[in-house]
Amino acid sequence: SRLNEKLIHVSGNEFEIEGLPITFKFYKYKGVKKVKVIKSDCDLKEGEIANKYIPVKIDKGILEKYCGTYWCEKDKLERKIILKDDKLIYEREKGEELYPITISRTEFMLFAFVENKIEFKKVKGEWQFTFDIKGKNPSHSLFVKKKIV
C-alpha cells in the first residue's frame, strides 16, 4: 500500500517518499500545520497544498453495508470493497489492496499518486459509489454493486 511508504529526510523540514519522485515540505501557516509538494514527477503538482483529513471512526455494521463487488459500466472495471480487521479495503485487483481513510459516514479518501475520493450512496435500495480522481487527467466513475446470481 502507498500509505505504508517510508519518508526519507532530505533537509530541514523536507522529506521524500521512498520509491516515489515526490518531495514534501512540512510547515505551519497561521498556526495550522500544512504539507506542500515542492518537487514532483507524477500527478501531484508542485506547489499543491495537501489537505488534512482526520479519520472518522465508523461502526463495523455500517462498513459491512458497503462491502461487495462493484461494476463500472463506462470504464468496464470491477472493484471489490471488503472488510478486514474492521477496516474497509478497496481491492483493485486480487492482492492489490488500498486502505481508504474514512472522512465521513459515506466518504473515504484513497491516496496513491493523487488524492482520490470514494463516496457511497444508496439509490433505489442498492449501494453504489462514485470514484473521483484528481490530477492531470481527472475522472469521475460510477460503480454499482453487482447482483449475486
Image (cartoon, rainbow, N blue to C red):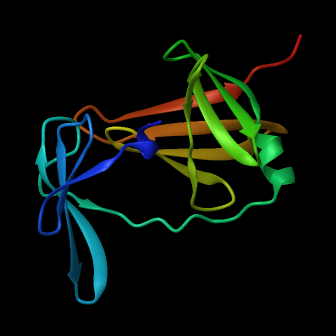
**Quadrant location of the C terminus in the rendered image:** top right
Could you tell me residue 145's position as x and y percent? 74, 27
Could you tell me residue 57's position as x and y percent? 70, 64
Query: Residue 16 vs residue 102: left or right?
Result: left
- What residue is shown at x 74% (from left), y 39% (from top)? 84
- Please identify the quarter of the rendering in which residue 40 is found: top left
- What residue is shown at x 76% (from left), y 45% (from top)? 85
- Please identify the quarter of the rendering in which residue 79 is found: top right
Residue 111 seen in render: no
Task: Please state the total of marks drawn on the protein image.
Answer: 0
- Please identify the quarter of the rendering in which residue 48 is found: bottom left
- What residue is shown at x 64% (from left), y 38% (from top)? 89
Query: Residue 28 vs residue 120: left or right?
Result: left
Q: Height in image: 148 above or below 66?
A: above
Q: Nearer the viewer, residue 14 or 143?
A: 14
Query: Residue 29 vs residue 46: left or right?
Result: right
Residue 36 seen in render: yes
Q: Height in image: 131 above or below 107?
A: above
Q: Height in image: 135 above or below 148?
A: below
Q: Nearer the viewer, residue 21 or 47?
A: 21
- What residue is shown at x 61% (from left), y 28% (from top)? 143
Could you tell me residue 65's position as x and y percent? 82, 43
Query: Residue 12 vs residue 109: left or right?
Result: left
Could you tell me residue 72's position as x and y percent? 58, 21
